[in-house]
């Protein structure tokens, strides 16, 4: 049977192990996974100062450890991230919005042959690195999560 993290403590333990395994890891101030819709980067879930298990999963797949950066993920990379995060779904204490959004993005990629976009913001005061980061920061602001 596949591994399952059925309690908040199990999720915290898994997060801690993943964080320890990623050299130089620093939790981002904000992060999210998006995709292109009609040429614009769209981020269905933005995370500011929370949901650090999906953050470290995404960072592991992208090879990110700290700071502000943007990464492109193909379908295989997104599949890996979904697989790594899926054991958390066993914990009914949480809604798992990131996992749901990642699966929706994966479905979109299957139909539109695109790429997912991962954005990590080390500090909300960091300058933006490109237009996708700008769109992510706008999504953070429109969600009222810009500090």
Image (spheres, grey):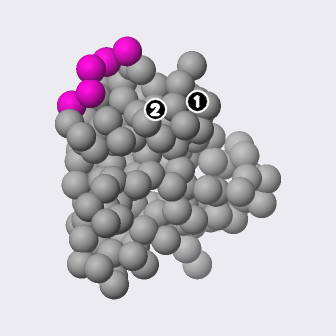
Residue at disc 1, secondary structure: loop
Disc marking residue 145 = 1
Quarter of the figure that contains the C terminus: top right
CB atoms of marks 1 and 2 within 8 Å: yes
128 falls in the magenta region: yes
Q: Which residues are magenta?
A: 125-129
Residue at disc 2, secondary structure: strand
Q: Residue at x 69, y 65 (%)?
A: 90
Residue 19 at what x, y percent from top left? Answer: 43, 36
Quarter of the figure that contains the N terminus: bottom right
Q: Residue at x 64, y 64 (%)?
A: 89
Near-viewer residue (25 or 147): 147
Disc marking residue 30 = 2
Report the residue that reaches farthest toward the front: 38
Near-viewer residue (62 or 90): 62
The answer to whether 14 appears left or right of 123 in the picture is right
Q: Residue at x 23, y 48 (%)?
A: 71
The answer to whether 59 appears left or right of 143 in the picture is left
Total marks in image = 2
Tell me which numbered mark, 1 or 2, is placed earlier along the sequence: 2
Residue 101 at what x, y percent from top left? Answer: 52, 62
Report the residue that reaches farthest toward the right: 93
Q: Residue at x 51, y 55 (%)?
A: 44
**Which of the 4 quarters of the picture holds residue 83?**
bottom left
């Amino acid at each position: 049977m596949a591994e399952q993290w059925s309690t908040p403590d199990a999720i915290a333990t898994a997060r801690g192990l993943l964080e320890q395994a990623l050299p130089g890891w620093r939790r981002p101030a904000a992060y999210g996974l998006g995709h292109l819709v009609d040429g614009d980067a769209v981020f269905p879930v933005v995370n500011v100062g929370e949901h650090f298990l999906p953050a470290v999963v995404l960072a592991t797949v992208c090879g990110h450890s700290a700071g502000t950066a943007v990464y492109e993920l193909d379908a295989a990379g997104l599949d890996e991230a979904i697989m790594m995060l899926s054991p958390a779904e066993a914990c009914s204490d949480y809604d798992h919005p990131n996992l749901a959004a990642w699966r929706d993005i994966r479905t979109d990629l299957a139909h539109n042959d695109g790429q997912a976009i991962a954005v990590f913001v080390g500090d909300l005061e960091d300058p933006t690195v490109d237009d996708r980061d700008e769109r992510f920061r706008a999504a953070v602001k429109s969600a009222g999560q810009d500090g």
